[in-house]
Image (cartoon, grey):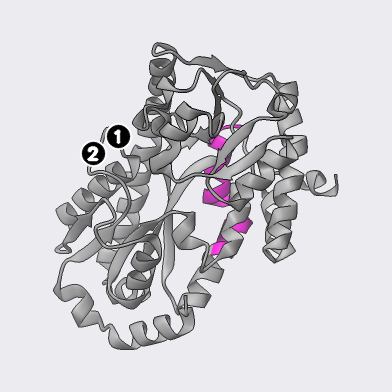
Amino acid sequence: MKLTAIATAALLATTAVAAQAEAIKLGYNGAPDEKKNSVHYFAVNFERIVEEKTDLEIDLFPNSQLGSEQERMENTLASPSLNIASFAGLSPVVPESFVSNTPFMFSGPEEARAFFDEGNYWKMVEEAFSDRTGGSQILAVVEDGGFLAFTSTDKPIYSPADFEGLKFRAMDPSQVALYEAMGASGTPVPWTEVYSALQTGVVEGQMNPPLYIILGSLNEVQSYMTMANVQYSMQFLVGNGAWIDSLSDADRAVVEAAIVEANDKTRKKVQETVDGRVEWLKNNGVEVIYPTDEQLAAFQEIGQPSFIDWLGNQKIEPSFIEAAFADLGKSELLNK
């Protein structure tokens, strides 16, 4: 993505008058279903609050109607609009954001939320994004289903040793590195093919939040789910810089408050929903495993160094990694 050219042309072409004159598009992935898609739930609440309290109009475009992750990001940088991006959309601009996806980084949702709300590392990511895009902003971290869990077909996963010799579906190269560090193999499989790959034994496990395990009917082809707090599932609300700058002080205050309120509602709903979905999986053929603190520490001891090595191979600036672990009070883990 030629960010400098895109951002410069966009910000020169976009005026305050144009930004205010028409409805602002908000694009994102997933179905327009408030019960099943937490990103849509966030978007609906954000839209409602803004339109109730200002003359601004927000138009929602779920199901990737505005294009792929990269297309939506380019459009957001180039015109007055909003976008909720996954790592696939955000990382080409700020690959440093991958640090927040380090496995076994957070002990629980409260720690994850404080990390993004209060930490120096995430401020560094936000500043880097704004600098590289000519003023566009990461406005919120939107929760997308809670923690990822491991699932497996025939063999329960209690500890890293249980991965030995298994074949796991991987979403990206970082997951391949994680599985290989634990003695398994990682095979890239598109989401649309995960069910059949598990059913036929092409792979024997995968990881996702309970939400996606249910959406994909993976309980029909997976017997075990290990709640190992692997990675925290999240997406990122991005706003066009010229549009943000065009807002009056009053409207900007409403937009900022609406983001906070919608995010608070989404966080509460996600947590409530996660618990219910885990129970649903228990009642629909899946044995749920809760690792002990000792077992979680073993996952962390193996999984984190392999991911940090992978970050180094992506040429992530070490200061971002150091800041992230300092925010968590876990700097000592970088010396292992």
| Residue 17 shows in this picture | yes
Q: Quadrant of residue 329?
A: top right
The location of residue 217, given as percent across then percent down, is 37, 27
- Front residue of 321/252: it is 321
Report the side of 298 relative to 263 (left or right). Answer: right
Q: Residues within 10 Å of mark 2 (few under 14, many from 20)?
A: few
Q: Which residue is mark 2?
A: 33
Residue at 39% of width from left, 31% of height from top? 211
Residue occupying the point 40% across, 66% down: 70
Q: Residue 164, how many percent across, how many down? A: 73, 29
Kindly state the secondary structure of the residue where label 2 is placed.
loop
Please report the bounds of the magenta region as a residue range: 107-125
Where is 174 relative to 214, above or below?
Answer: below
Residue 330 visible, this angle: no
Q: Is 131 situated left or right of 319 in this image?
A: left
Query: Which SS type dominates the magenta stretch?
Result: helix
Quarter of the image for the C terminus: give it: top right
In the figure, residue 318 lies in which quadrant? Answer: bottom right
3D distance between C-alphas at marks 1 and 2: 5 Å
331 or 167, nearer to the observer = 167
- Asked whether the residues under the numbered discs 1 and 2 touch, taking CB atoms below 8 Å apart as contact, a structural biologist would say yes
Q: Amino acid at mark 1?
A: Lys
Question: Which residue has dot 1 on it?
Answer: 36
Residue drawn 58% across and 47% down?
A: 115
